[in-house]
Amino acid sequence: MDLVLAIFVTLVGAATPILIAALGELVVEKSGVLNLGVEGMMLVGAIAGFAGQFYTGNPYFALLCGAFAGLAVSQIFAFLTLSLSANQTATGLALTIFGTGLSALAGAPFSARPVSLMGPLFPAELASHPLLRVVFGYAAPVYFSVIMVFAIWYFLQRTRAGLILRAVGENDHSAHSIGYPVNAVRYAAVAFGGAMAGVAGACFPLLLTPQWAERMTAGRGWIAVALVVFASWRPFRLLAGAYFFGLVMTMELYAKAGSGPLSSIPSELWAALPYLATIVVLVLISIRRDAFTNAPACLGKPFLPTS
Amino acid sequence: MTLNRRSILKAGAAAAALPLLGSRAFAQGEPLKVGFIYVGTINDNGYNYAHNQGRLYLEEKLGDAVETTYVENVPEGPDCERVLRELAQQGNKLIFATSFGFGDSVIKVAQQFPDVKFEHATGYMKADNVGLYNARFYEGRAVCGTIAGHLSKTGKAGYIGSFPIPEVVMGINSFVLAARKVNPDFTIRPVYISTWNDPAKEADTARAMIDQGIDVIAQHTDGPAALQVAQERGIVGGFGQGADMSEFAPETQLTSIIDHWGPHYAASAQAVIDGTWTAGDTWEGLKEDVVQIGPYGPKVTDEVKAAAEAVRTGQIDGSFHIFTGPIKDNTGVERVPAGQTMTDAELLSMDWYVEGVEQPA
């Protein structure tokens, strides 16, 4: 029982940065923009978050640093793709390469410097029992990520601003013709996505391992991008998908490290599960087209107003 | 002189455009140009960091007699060949390729530049102008294993490995053999994570191991993430790898294995300057100071320190070799008879685990 709870706590830690970055990307894509630069923005957020923690020791300030850094580089992408109509796929890839290099450059003075991990949000007495630890034992970004799932769902489905954002993503010309500022909406969406990716990156030195290492996100930005498609642009499916990926990544390690009943399940099976799940989702999509194909119609296309 | 890959490619393109100006001659009095290529970044706090420390040591020892260049983050593949060729075209007369996977490219480029000397770390293919060098990290791991055997309360350790290659398997076996000389019930479970550097995964692996009852962690990956988790969870301890990592876990690092390539680099460069360089095949360890043991942590008692030092000095004076029989493998079959020591060739192709190692899942 204790082991199950321990696994749960570890998987939540592994899933949280992916979930936060994917939520940001979901909003970006809902506005009709495909930003493949998540990995690069996360890395910039990671070094900014590390530096914030290193100099102030205040993890909340560090998260803000990460958010701001992610937002700042996302605006380079926004300017190139929205104002200059550059190809979004290529620019997103370039943003990842740029973010990787920039974070390495900025991080050079911070090698071999440890910081302290962000502590749990609630007082330790609340999390004294292992069962309570599953609820109250995490640092703030974990709760932030879950609250954001609800907030983004509410924003997209229940607010006027969310409706406009979706309209821009579904049919930019129609939205433009009835007077909505398409590019302004998309700039805002990209900025939000950048800030979320920055926070997600800052989670690496603050939640997972308190150090700076080049490329420390190790491809998780790409998992976040894939997860948005996997979840068919729906926030709650994103939550489930992120925790499923977190479970699979964590179980593989526990299965390898364990000597009890856990190790009787081959770790290769865990490693293969995300691919099997992807196949299942693809099959479901082909069976029930309406329930799963939810991609914004204008995703990835530049907006060139004709009038 | 500091170069990244991009600027050296540019410089290389410029050099290719002016083939007649390529510096072929190496006149006496000019500094010897020495190139290094690293598979990762020099800020990884581990393997590549240690090679770069070796380069700095070389600069410090030989001063104006040498001029060094390094290229970091070179993937093992076609890029490596290009970088090597350009280093050679720029007049580097001695080039150190520091990663196993560079081997094929080194042999190829070395044929095109017979007057340039190459040295390949941890490789196996030699040529007239390609030498090999390696370090006996397993000697350091025997010291770590001795400490683990004394200090572990559960008698169970975890070992985070990158890939099950002989180098890593040898390290695991050395660690366990040493620990079992102290505690015959000592067991270890290796977990391979298929990467040299993914700090978050290393940390989660450490968490998975600790949740399942181990209290000592060793690792053969590049960074200090596992040690940080060991410190966070308050287990007995872990070991630094490649470099002293006590900054990251001051209470919990028991000691560390330090790669100290500097003396080898200095000796090779001096040999090229003196004209005495030949393609060697060195595998040096504690005795030659290429492998060092870092400072002992606060949890290592005087008694344990003495035991660790005995293993260290025994390997230096040659009275102790960790791979001396009797050694059984983890299926109970005797692999090395009593009194016999494994040969270097046997060590370098090791693909089985000693008794006490649980077969990795």
Image (cartoon, coloured by chain):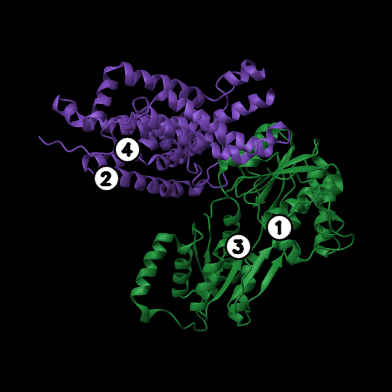
Few, some or many C-alpha atoms within 10 Å of disc 4 (few <14, some 14-19, many ≥20)? many
Residue A299 location in percent, x, y? 29, 35
Q: Looking at this view, name the residue that lies furthest to the front.
A: A287
Task: Please name the amino acid that badge 3 sits on.
Answer: Gly
Q: Tell which of A225 and B253 is nearer to you.
A: A225
Q: Chain letter of disc 3?
A: B
Which one is in front in this view, the residue at disc 4 or the one at disc 1?
4
Any part of residue A21 in sight: no
Q: Nearer the viewer, mark 3 or mark 4?
A: 4
Residue B195 on image: x %, y %:
57, 48
Q: Residues within 10 Å of mark 3 (few under 14, many from 20)?
A: many
The chain that hosts pointer 4 is: A
SS of the residue under disc 1: helix
Q: Quadrant of residue A273?
A: top right
Give neighbour class at mark 2: few <14, some 14-19, many 20+ (Cα, 10 Å). Answer: some
Alpha-carbon span between mark 2 and mark 3: 45 Å
Residue beneath disc 1: B137
Question: Where does label 2 land, which residue?
Answer: A87
In this structure image, what is the colour of chain B?
A: green
Contact (CB < 8 A) between labels 1 and 2?
Answer: no
x, y percentage for residue A60? 48, 28
Q: Is residue B112 above or below residue A186?
A: below
The crowding category of the residue bearing disc 1, from other C-alpha atoms within 10 Å (few below 14, some 14 to 19, many at least 20), is many
Q: Which residue corresponds to mark 3? A: B54
Residue A34's label in the rendered image is: 4
Determine the secondary structure under disc 3: helix
Mark 4 in CB contact with mark 2 (< 8 angstroms): no
Per the rendering, the colour in which chain A appears is purple
